[in-house]
Amino acid sequence: MGTGQMSRAYTPKVVTANALAEGDVVYLTSDDRWTRDHAEAELIEDEAHAQLRLLKAEHQKNVVVGAYLADAKAGPKGPEPIHFREVFRTRGPSNYAHGKQEARHV
Amino acid sequence: MYKYSDFDEAFVRTRNAQFRAQVERRISGALTEDEFRPLRLMNGLYLQLHAYMLRVAIPYGTLSSAQMRRLAWIAERWDKGYGHFTTRQNIQFNWPKLTDVPDILEALADVGMHSIQTSGNTIRNVTADHFAGAAADEIEDPRPTAELIRQWSTDHPEFQFLPRKFKIGVSGSPHDRAVTKSHDIGLRIVRGGDGKTGYEVLVGGGLGRTPMVGQVIRPFLKKADLLPYLEAIVSTYNVMGRRDNKFKARVKITVFENGMEKFRDAVDARFEHIRREWAGVDPSLLAHIEHSFLPPAFRSAPEDGYRTARRADPVFRAWSDTNVTAHRVPGYAIVTVSLKAHGTTPGDATAAQMRLLADLADSYGHGELRISHEQNVVLPHVHKSDLWALHARLKTEGLATANVGLVSDIIACPGMDYCALATARSIPVAQEIATHFQSLGLEEEIGALKIKISGCINACGHHHVGHIGILGLDRAGVENYQITLGGDHTETMTLGERAGPGFAYDEIVPAIERLLRAYLALRAGREETFLAAYRRLGAGPFKAALYEAEAERDAA
């Protein structure tokens, strides 16, 4: 019990980082762009591929800072974050409508 | 107010020019992030959750009106129109662009400010009692000492790569408002047997992962021996402190692992050595510092208007009851301006609020302001006859909240709304506690209370020393809040005790309400504060109130 197929399945990932010049949260897309929108990120379902994509991100030293893989899941509009920290990173702080939520006027 | 000497000015401008070139090299790709990171941290620039954050030093929490106006201008020109005052008396800007930071640093240098040593494993910005030079119980103004330490520690070649960060706090009063016992070194100005003032030196205090109360390493240090003795402590730590484990690298662990006796012996041996070579502080430099903190020209004027206004205006009376403290000079008062209006972010001030505070400091407060570690702004020298007019003008920018020292006067770190290290949010918890008790109408009834909230174990929100401490954690991917009880941040410093299992985000405010309703039911009378009741009764009845649902379930 508890060691079945499901628990060993790879949790899908997105590659995320902060933009070098202004620090805003960015995500790597499947066509090698950096997007500000989590839903546009490439949802990576294979561990080896995820490592390759992370390497690609880490090589872009003049564009982004601190790239890492974050857990994500498929959603109706594209990938969605799982952990609450990653949810906050998709929108900005909760005390003011600043950051991404400000840019989108939500 | 201390004004930069030619040396200070040249030093800061040179550092700014260096940093401008470093930013250019980072953007061009000549520097990698690994190379750039320590350089930006030396200049107080962090990369946080959503953006960069610039931490600007406010040495010993003292600001001039011109400096406050400049902070307002920076907030509007390069940030989002506000700044966040911190528990180390600094200000943080949450949204600067990397490419703007060199210009911001130059704008700061124009008014004698900088971000040097607000980060990194160095001696950090020196903090002091926010009532310095004004408090009725003060033995001596701690700021000349703090400024001397600032000059000694800034760019000190031996102490740029310490095992870990190093914080010094100074108090000149028997009532400790500077939390000296939670600093790596705490200095308390005391009077010696011959009537001369000197320092009681504490070492090894700290909050964070392993909270410890600072212990006395030297009961009385002559003033002239201050710098060689500090040098002896920090250089002993620099050698003995652990560099193999970040969590055991602070001086509190060095003292704990070696024992105070062994650490003191090592410091004393080093002190004897340093003192022999020590020629003393340049007397003209010392005179410049001491002259900078001379009291303003206090005036003598009638106070009748103040008494009349208190009788006539109940809102003013309530505010002057909570936000005004006794001054050492007859006719004067210390005003604490609350940055904790119910529902707002603790410690945040808009550019308009900063400008008004600067104007009020000029009109009524000899041009001087202070930032408290409790994230409020202090006007240290206001004549009582000006208090009513001051209060009226504070109202125009939402700065007249009468809640200093009450349930809504909460310390909260930025937490996971901003901080990359945070494990949970702090700000919305503070906002909800404040608005909840306001709507219950219980704030005045509850009386004196310190709630302190940290969004991670590093304890920037001082939760261990809150009467009620709240620590936000990540428990299996969900925000969870642990409560500690009975902490005390003053000269009788006590670390709070953990009450039990944590509470979910939507359970924490109801839990605090159960706790405070239990206090109201249990207290001996209105004059018995929450902390006093806790000390008399112990944790038992308060834990029972927190976990009553579970107790009932267990009994069923």
Image: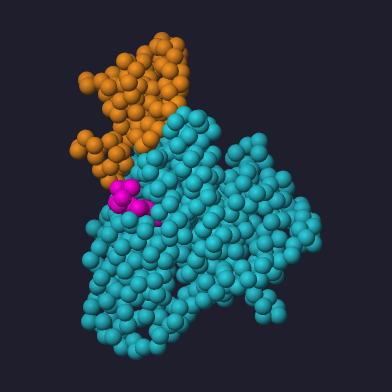
Chain colours: A orange, B cyan
The residue lying furthest to the left in this view is A105
Q: Where does the magenta region start and end?
A: B74-85
Residue pictured at 37% horizontal, 53% vertical: B84
Instruction: Out of A80 and B504, give the one closest to the viewer.
Output: A80
Instruction: Name the image quarter holding the C terminus of chain B.
Output: top left
**Could you say where residue B81 lies in the image, as x and y percent from the top left?**
29, 51
Camera sees residue B401: no
Instruction: Out of B488 and B421, give the one closest to the viewer.
Output: B421
- In the visual, does B236 lie left or right of B300? right
**Could you say where residue B124 lies in the image, as x and y percent from the top left?**
55, 52
Residue B149 lies in the magenta stretch: no
Toward which corner of the image does residue B367 lie, by quadrant?
bottom left
Q: Is residue B43 above or below residue B148?
A: above
**Could you say where residue B518 lies in the image, as x and y percent from the top left?**
37, 58
- In the visual, does B180 lie left or right of B388? right
Residue pictured at 74% horizontal, 55% vertical: B267
Residue pictured at 51% horizontal, 44% vertical: B18
Toward which corner of the image does residue B387 lie, by quadrant?
bottom left
